[in-house]
Image (cartoon, rainbow, N blue to C red):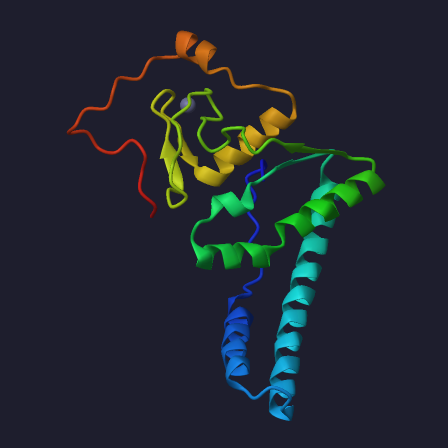
Amino acid sequence: MSNGEKVISPDYSKKDRKIRKLQRKLARQQKGSSRLEITRLRIAKQHNQIADTRKDFLHKLSTKVVSENQAIILEDLNVSGMVKNRRLARVISLQGWREFRVLCEVKSEKFNRDFRVISRWEPTSQTCSCCGYRWGKIDLSVRSVLCLNCNTQHDRDENASQNIKMVGMGHRHDPKRTQRTGKTGSPAQSGEASRITAPR
Ligand SMILES: [Zn+2]
């Protein structure tokens, strides 16, 4: 979030692993048998528990975010395009980002807040939120970036949240203007240390 706060979601992985294990078991069991029926119910129960935990978490978080802020700006993420990795896709789908967005939108209306979603094409993770310098695409594994132009060390998510806020409030990054007026960084030398720092 743009106030620097980070929120950690509940860990659904244990129950998710259990579901996958039970599903493998289910596939081996005889159709129409009572044992299969028991497995089916156990899977449904795990799914329900995950959904309950998630719903509770997302409700509390959206209520907090909406009640504490006058404007709520989210980024529209291309979730299916974002992850090519199947494991990561599963983890992300368990988070319920869409559900969170809907909850924020509904509550914003109820409490008369300004709710906006910015385009997925805004380069929120490719641009310095301090000076507007655009360093380009960085891999998801890179969590921290040093801006060459203004020498600010950014946490990836914090920087993106600042950009989301700026874009949502009507500010546009203008790379041409930044390049003219900003300090010009020198091109990278082959021997110099990485300008994009590796994850800790
Ligand atoms: Zn910068």
Observer-nearest residue: 11 or 19? Answer: 19
Q: Position of residue 166 (x, y in %)?
A: 59, 25
Judged left or right of residue 34, residue 107 is: right
Judged left or right of residue 9, residue 127 is: left
Decide if residue 9 is in sight here. no
Decide if residue 168 is in sight here. yes
Identity of the residue furthest to the left in this view: 191
Residue at x 58% of width, y 35% of height: 2
Residue at x 39% of width, y 28% of height: 136
Identity of the residue furthest to the front in this view: 31
Observer-nearest residue: 100 or 6? Answer: 100
Q: Position of residue 163 (x, y in %)?
A: 54, 29
Residue 59, above or below 151: below
Q: Position of residue 60 (x, y in %)?
A: 71, 54
Residue 3, above or below 200: above
Residue at x 34% of width, y 45% of height: 199
Identity of the residue furthest to the top in this view: 180
Q: Quadrant of ligand 1?
A: top left
Viewport quadrant of the N terminus = top right
Judged left or right of residue 196, residue 52 is: right
Q: Position of residue 66 (x, y in %)?
A: 73, 42
Residue 130, above or below 70: above
Q: Quadrant of residue 126?
A: top left
